Structures are given as structure tokens and as C-alpha cells.
Amino acid sequence: MPATARVGRLGRMTTHRATKPVASPTQTVERAVTIGLILAVLAGLAWIAGMIYTIAEWPL
């Protein structure tokens, strides 16, 4: 079977794309995840600072 015959049977792909909504329902989840990650980083930095302070003030 020639290659051109196989291509003709596949048909054309659609080029229609649905428009993206302005505010999707997943956007609030993304915000919550971002806020959670920021809070986790801040908590980690506070913990590290506390450990450094504890070691610095440790009586030798």
C-alpha cells in the first residue's frame, strides 16, 4: 500500500481549540498550594534561625 493512501485514510486533525476561561476553578487550588509552600518555607527559615540561635547561646 503506498504511503499516500494511508495518509488519506487518517483524515484531518481538528484545529479548534476551546477558549480558556478567565478564572478557572483550579486557580484557587493553585493559590492555596502557593500560599502553603510560602508558609512552609517561612517556617523552615524560622526553624533554622531558632536552631542557630540555640547553638550560639549554648553554654560551653
Image: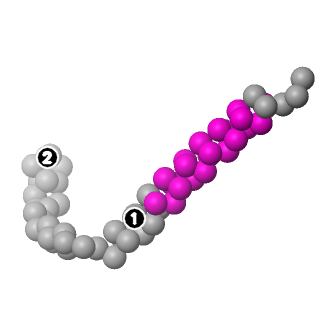
Question: Is 57 placed above or below 4 here?
Answer: above
Label of residue 31 in the image: 1
The mark lying in front, picked from 2 and 1, is 1
Tell me what residue is drawn at x 71 percent, y 33 percent: 52
Residue range of the region highlighted in magenta in the rendering? 35-55
Quadrant of the image containing the C terminus: top right
Amino acid type, label 1: Arg
Label of residue 39 in the image: none
Disc 1 residue crowd, few under 14, some 14–19, many 20+, Cα 10 Å: few
Numbered circles on residues, count: 2
**Position of residue 47 in the picture relative to residue 26 (left or right):** right
Tell me what residue is drawn at x 14 percent, y 70 percent: 19
Question: Is 13 placed above or below 45 here?
Answer: below
Amino acid type, label 2: Pro
Reading the image, the residue beneath label 2 is 2
Where in the figure is residue 55, as x and y percent of width and height?
Answer: 78, 31
In the structure shown, which secondary structural element does the residue marked by tag 2 occupy?
loop
Compute the Cα span from label 2 to label 1.
Answer: 53 Å
Residue 29 drawn in magenta: no
Where in the figure is residue 24, as x and y percent of width and height?
Answer: 28, 73
Where in the figure is residue 1, as x and y percent of width and height?
Answer: 18, 49
Residue 47 drawn in magenta: yes
Q: How is the image coloured?
A: one colour
Q: Main secondary structure of the magenta part?
A: helix
Disc 2 residue crowd, few under 14, some 14–19, many 20+, Cα 10 Å: few
Question: Is 35 placed above or below 53 here?
Answer: below
Asked whether the beta carbons under mark 2 and mark 1 sit within 8 Å of each other, the answer is no
Question: Is 18 placed above or below 8 here?
Answer: below
